[in-house]
Image: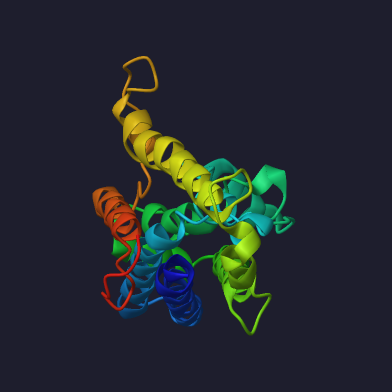
Amino acid sequence: TNLAMGLIIPAYENLQEHTTGLVFTIEAFNSDPSEVNLVAAQTALKNSWLAWQSASIYMFGPAESVALRKSLNTYPTDVNQIDTNIQTGDYILSSLANQAAVGFPAIDYLLNGVALDNANIIAQYRGAEDGQKQYLADLADDIKTRVDQSLNGWTTDGENYTATFTEDDALGIDIGSSLSTIVNAIDLHFQRFVRDGKVAIPAGVRSAGVPRPKAIEALHGGYSVALLEESLAAYEKMFMGIAADDMDGAG
C-alpha cells in the first residue's frame, strides 16, 4: 500500500504535471520561436525527463499496457527516421518503425540537437515548414496521453490497479504476487536500462570495450548524469519506503 499510494501514484502524478507543462511550452514555442520560449521548452523537457526517472521503475500493470518505457525513453533516437517523418508527414508514432523516433530523446533532438546553439535552433524553426513543428507537438501530446493513461490505471477513480496490487490474493512471494512483480520489474530496469543503458553501453563495457558516447541518454541536452543520479535516488526511496511527502514508510 505504501508503494502504491506513497511512491508509485505520486511519481506518475509528478510526471503528469511536468509532461502537461511540456505540451504547453512546446505549443508556445511553435507559436513564437523565441529565445524565452525555447529555453522554457528545453527546461520543461529536462524536468519531465527527471520526473520520468521515479516512475520508470514501475513498468508493470497500466504502464506496461501502454508501452510507456518504449514510447517515452528509447535511445539513441533515430534522427533519420525523425527527419523522414517530418518530410513526409506520414507517420504513426505507435508503430514499430517509429519506436526510436518518439519520446523524450526525439524531443531532445528537436529542441537541442537540430543546430549548434539556441540562436540557430530558433532560426531553423522560424524558417521551418509546419511539419517540424507539428511533429514536435505530436511527440509531446503522445507522451502526455500515455502518462495520463498510466496514472488513470492506478488511481481509485480510474481503473484502480491499486486494488489489484494490494488485494489479499497479491500478497506473499509466489509468482504473480505484487512482491514478485516488483522484484522482476526493478531487476530488469536496473540491469538493462540503468546499468547498461545509462552507463555500460555508452562507456563501452557492453560493446567490446569501444565507447559509444552517442548512445547516452540525453545526448543533445547534456544532462545524462543528472538523469542517472535521479534514477538512483528513486531506487533508494523505493527500497527505504520513503514516500513523496518524505514520510518514512514500509520499504
State the image coordinates of residue 185 (x, y, percent, origin top left): 51, 47
Q: Compare residues 76 and 64 and report the one nearer the observer.
A: 64
| Residue 142: quadrant of the picture | bottom right
Left or right: 60 as drawn, with respect to 219:
right
Q: How is the image coloured?
A: rainbow
Occupied quadrant, residue 47: bottom left
> Quick check: 113 above or below 215?
below
Residue 75, percent from left and from top: 47, 43
Query: How far from the left and from the top, in percent, is residue 201?
Result: 37, 30
What is the residue that sits farthest to the bottom in this orientation?
157
Q: Residue 49: percent from the left, percent from the top?
A: 39, 61
- Residue in view at x 32 percent, y 58 percent: 234
**Image quadrant containing the C terminus:** bottom left
Residue at 58% x, 57% y is 68
Q: Is residue 56 left or right of residue 236?
A: right
Vertically, is 9 above or below 53?
below
Q: Nearer the viewer, residue 194 or 234?
A: 234
> Which residue occupies the foreground of this view, 172 or 165?
172
Q: Nearer the viewer, residue 172 or 140?
A: 172
The residue sitting at the top extreme is 208
In this rendering, the answer to whether 176 lies above or below 201 is below
Location of residue 78 by image quarter = top right
Res 244 seen here: yes
Q: Is residue 222 left or right of residue 128?
A: left
